[in-house]
């Protein structure tokens, strides 16, 4: 079962990496700086969403495979992180590129810093 996960992740990650290399190659060929920044911003949101999915997936797989000696609480915690973290953080990853939302987030953190 673990080898299936490794091959699935490996093939998936390879295809995603190849597609982003091709996208980056195309983006760098765009003449306008503004269009390049917009496209790279969108790519960054997509890459963060992929990252938010794969990191908990890899962690849960490793805990399941090598964590026989760990407490069942750790297994449940990793399962919950795997299920909830991508769902909670995915909208944040995509909304940060919206100027109004980004401005408001910065204001909230600056207020907390000033306190």
Image (cartoon, rainbow, N blue to C red):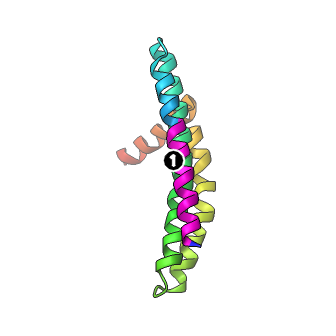
Image coords of residue 40 (percent x, y)? 49, 29
- Read off the magenta span: 2-19
Q: Is 53 above or below relative to 69?
A: above
How many numbered badges does the structure rendering display? Answer: 1
Which secondary structure lies at badge 1?
A: helix
Residue designated by label 1: 14
Nearer to us in this view, 97 or 8: 8
What secondary structure characterizes most of the magenta part? helix
Q: Quadrant of residue 16?
A: top right
Nearer to us in this view, 104 or 77: 77
Q: Is 93 above or below relative to 57?
A: above
Image coords of residue 49 (percent x, y)? 56, 46
Circle 1 packing at 10 Å, graded few (<14), some (14-19), many (20+), is few
Image coords of residue 28 (percent x, y)? 45, 21
Nearer to us in this view, 89 or 66: 66
Would residue 12 be counted in the magenta stretch?
yes
Which residue is found at the position 55% from the left and 48% from the top? 50
Q: Would residue 7 be visible to someone looking at this image?
A: yes
Q: Would residue 81 be visible to someone looking at this image?
A: no
Q: Is 74 above or below relative to 29?
A: below
């Amino acid at each position: 079962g673990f080898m299936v996960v490794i091959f699935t992740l490996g093939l998936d990650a390879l295809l995603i990496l190849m597609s982003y290399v091709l996208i980056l190659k195309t983006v760098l060929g765009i003449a306008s700086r503004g269009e390049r920044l917009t496209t790279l911003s969108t790519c960054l949101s997509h890459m963060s969403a992929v990252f938010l999915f794969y990191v908990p997936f890899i962690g849960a797989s490793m805990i399941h495979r090598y964590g026989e000696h760990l407490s069942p609480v750790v297994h449940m915690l990793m399962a919950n992180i795997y299920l909830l973290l991508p769902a909670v953080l995915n909208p944040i990853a995509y909304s940060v590129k919206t100027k109004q939302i980004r401005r408001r987030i910065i204001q909230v953190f600056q207020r907390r810093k000033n306190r």
